[in-house]
Image (cartoon, grey):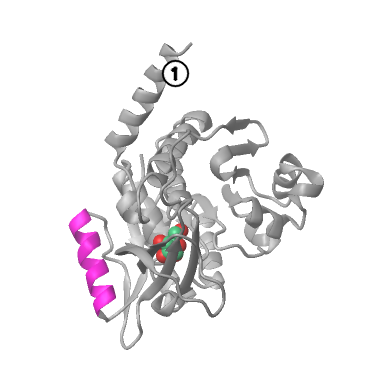
Amino acid sequence: MGKIIVVGSSNTDLITRVERFPKAGETVEGKHFMLAMGGKGANQALAAHKLGGEVKFITSMGDDINGENALKYYQKEGLDVKSSLIIKGTPSGTATILVDENGENCIVITPGANNGLSPEYVFERKEEIRSASLLLLQMEIPYESVIESCRIASEANTNIMLNVAPARSLAREVIRLVDILVVNETEAEIISGEKVIEVGEQAVVDKLLALGARSVVLTLGSRGCFMKSESEHYTIPAFKVKPVDSTGAGDTFCGALAVGLNKGWGWKDALIFASAASAICVTRMGAQPSIPTEKEVQFFLNKYQSTSNNTH
Ligand code: RIB
């Protein structure tokens, strides 16, 4: 098994639990506050690390207290962040997150130093990308840096997994470089130009494959996920859990999927592993504090299997 390299964002998450989201101009009282490390890149890198992958994380932070704390935290967790960029005089990324009683969230990100993770810096790290077996990317760093990462990886035959979150359109040349495209419904609609309600989920996925992605994973929240490539397709229902906070569930799914596929598992096993990891994540508060370990996922899957065997 080779290395997983994650090139992506890192934020400090300021999370407040509320009964309901405020309307414009309204003040509501928070029920609970939590400060934790976050950012889609960092969440996916930490998830892959905790779930059994050998991971290198390339990110960008400011030389402020948030950046300092984040670096210390990742070093303590044993995540390799040695190749990260520290930008003087720039604030580190932050995310202000509200979570309501149903576990749904609203997020405002202020990218700060994440916007400084330039294509030039990515190019400087090209040997690290080339030597990895899987590159994992999201969309919270400049688009040009995502493209540069894909270009370097594709020349070296490094597998590319792109989670198009937050949603944005992608050039066809970029989609063609991607081995595993992970999208939710909104993201799939923006990239394909098709509406799920009009043509159905399968047709939207087919359009993404026709645009050049080698495989597509469509995540469907509490309904599970659907995967399709030229030769395979799977529908995996979600594990039923009581949701507390959905923040970071998609990131945990991506990190876990990257680990499974990078270990050479078949699609079905990797998707079930990723679904279990994200199911555990939604039962807990915060993004990174909710990411389970590999042992916890195995325990969850064993328990789930023995319960479903007993009920049949
Ligand atoms: O996907 C969840 C993440 O989105 C949070 O950790 C927040 O930092 C934002 O990037």
Q: Is residue 294 above or below residue 42?
A: above
Q: Residue at x 43, y 13 (%)?
A: 309
- Out of 105 and 289, give the one closest to the viewer: 105
Where is residue 44? Give x, y as percent: 40, 54
Q: Using residue 81 as the reference point, say whether residue 160 is left or right of it.
A: right
Q: Is residue 281 visible?
A: yes
Q: Quadrant of the N terminus?
A: top left
SS at badge 1:
helix
Q: Amino acid at mark 1?
A: Ser
Q: Which residue is mark 1?
A: 308
Q: Quadrant of ligand 1?
A: bottom left
Q: How many marks?
A: 1
Main SS of the magenta segment?
Answer: helix
Q: Residue at x 43, y 34 (%)?
A: 273
Q: Residue at x 48, y 58 (%)?
A: 137
The magenta region covers 65-77
Residue 29 forms part of the magenta stretch: no
Q: Is residue 235 above or below residue 253?
A: above
Residue 76 forms part of the magenta stretch: yes
Q: Using residue 253 as the reference point, say whether residue 51 is left or right of it.
A: left
Q: Using residue 196 as the reference point, say whether residue 311 is left or right of it.
A: left
| Ligand 1 within 8 angstroms of badge 1 C-beta | no
Q: Is residue 172 above or below residue 61?
A: above
Q: Residue at x 39, y 74 (%)?
A: 93
Where is residue 91? Give x, y as percent: 35, 82
How busy is the neighbourhood of tag 1: few (under 14 within 10 Å), some, or many (20 plus)? few
